């Protein structure tokens, strides 16, 4: 890791920060899946029949990947999964912006409810997701896939 | 045929034509006004509340479904501008064509209520009114909400 100038402390910090954020994001979605499903419906990309399953899948993936990043369990796989999700979010929001649709982005409703920061799709959430993508990259490329409590040979 | 009689005939035929022509008739002249009035059919807060109390109207929320899910006028139905085509079949089954509908959005700056009202009229609902004050005015007045 030192060879390419990425201290492991930085990877750990990124892993912990992103882990906490994804746990909050996934957890709040799981707590109110109906609301999240209605926001997904507003994107007008998926057929109505698939929306509840996708809402559950996205929320669960965020929560699981967040927890795994926090615990350093298969961090590279978790970060790679979140990278794919970020790409999907960015494409979905950009697509709706181009179509001129205005609606809630369904990103961090926790902050919306507690601090009144209602977030609609727009440049702000897209830039934030690009930032998350950039922050996830070092973890996906250089993070650990080891299980911490398992003893490794050599 | 003399020039004078030809002129007279032309004037009479023009008058006759104009009396039967839809473009010149009074009925036709009144029609756009009637349509314009119908499009601008709005109710204020006190009328909306009277309709609500008398249970004589169905309130229709034109905002997105997730916004409706969070809060709405008590007893209102969701029929969002963005997903009108998806929601309308269910709405049509539940609400009779002759029902008085009061469509609302967030407030006066939100065009969704007018859009939904127009779509409802297009789909056969004749008794459609818009409450431009919307949810902001309703909630500020402390009137019943749910969600």
Image (cartoon, rainbow, N blue to C red):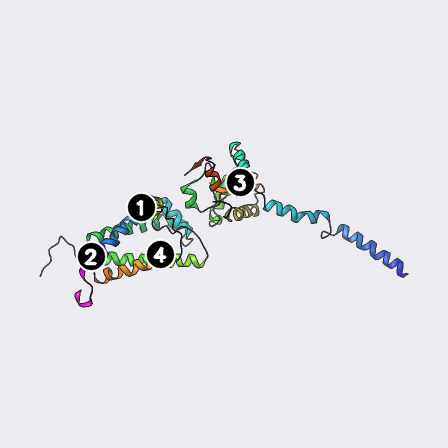
Whether pointer 2 and pointer 3 mark residues with C-beta atoms closer than 8 Å, the reply is: no
**Protein chain holding label 1:** A
Q: Residue at x 40, y 42 (%)?
A: B70
* Image quadrant in which the N terminus of chain A is located: bottom left
In 3D space, how far apart are the residues under numbered discs 1 and 4 (Cα atoms)?
17 Å
* Label 3 sits on residue: B102
* Mark closest to the chain's N terminus, 1 or 4: 1
Q: Residues within 10 Å of mark 2 (few under 14, many from 20)?
A: some
Q: Chain of mark 3?
A: B
Q: Which residue is label 2 attached to?
A: A12
Q: Position of residue B41 (x, y in %)?
A: 58, 43
**B81 on left or right of B2:** left
Q: Residue furthest top?
A: B54
Within 10 Å of disc 1 (Cα), the crowding (few <14, some 14-19, many 20+) is some
Q: Secondary structure at mark 3?
A: strand
- The residue identified by callout 1 is A28
Q: Which of pointers 2 and 3 indicates the residue nearer the eye? A: 2
**Which residue lies most toward the left here?**
A154
The reply to the same-chain question for discs 1 and 3 is no
Secondary-structure class at tag 4 = helix
Q: Position of residue A125 (x, y in %)?
A: 36, 55
Q: CA distance from mark 1 to mark 3?
A: 34 Å
Q: Give the letter of the chain under mark 2.
A: A
Labels 1 & 4 near each other (Cβ < 8 A): no
Q: Is residue B72 above or below residue A126?
A: above
Relative placement, left or right, of B7 versus A139 is right
Of mark 2 and mark 4, the one earlier in the sequence is 2
Give the residue number, with chain letter if any, for mark 4: A89
């Amino acid at each position: 890791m030192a060879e390419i100038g990425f201290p492991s402390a930085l990877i750990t910090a990124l892993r912990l920060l992103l882990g906490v954020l994804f746990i909050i994001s996934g957890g709040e979605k799981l707590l109110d899946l109906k609301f999240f499903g209605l926001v997904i419906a507003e994107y007008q990309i998926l057929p109505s029949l698939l929306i509840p399953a996708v809402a559950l899948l996205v929320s669960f993936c965020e929560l699981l990947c967040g927890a795994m990043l926090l615990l350093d369990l298969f961090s590279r796989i978790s970060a790679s999964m979140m990278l794919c999700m970020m790409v999907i979010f960015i494409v979905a929001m950009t697509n709706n912006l181009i179509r001129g649709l205005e609606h809630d982005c369904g990103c961090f409703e926790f902050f919306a409810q507690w601090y009144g920061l209602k977030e609609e799709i727009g440049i702000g959430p897209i830039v934030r997701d690009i930032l998350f993508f950039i922050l996830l990259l070092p973890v996906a490329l250089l993070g650990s896939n080891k299980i911490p409590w398992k003893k490794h040979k050599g | 045929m003399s020039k004078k009689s030809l002129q007279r005939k032309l004037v009479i035929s023009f008058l006759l034509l104009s009396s039967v022509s839809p473009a010149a008739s009074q009925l036709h002249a009144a029609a756009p006004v009637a349509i314009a009035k119908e499009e601008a059919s709005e109710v204020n807060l006190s009328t909306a509340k009277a309709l609500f109390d008398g249970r004589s109207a169905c309130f229709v929320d034109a905002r997105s479904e997730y916004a409706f899910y969070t809060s709405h006028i008590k007893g209102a139905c969701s029929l969002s501008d963005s997903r009108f085509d998806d929601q309308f079949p269910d709405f049509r089954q539940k609400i009779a064509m002759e029902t008085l509908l009061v469509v609302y959005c967030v407030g006066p700056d939100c065009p969704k209520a007018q859009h939904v009202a127009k779509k409802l009229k297009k789909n056969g609902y004749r008794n459609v009114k818009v409450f431009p004050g919307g949810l902001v005015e309703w909630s500020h007045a402390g009137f019943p909400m749910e969600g």
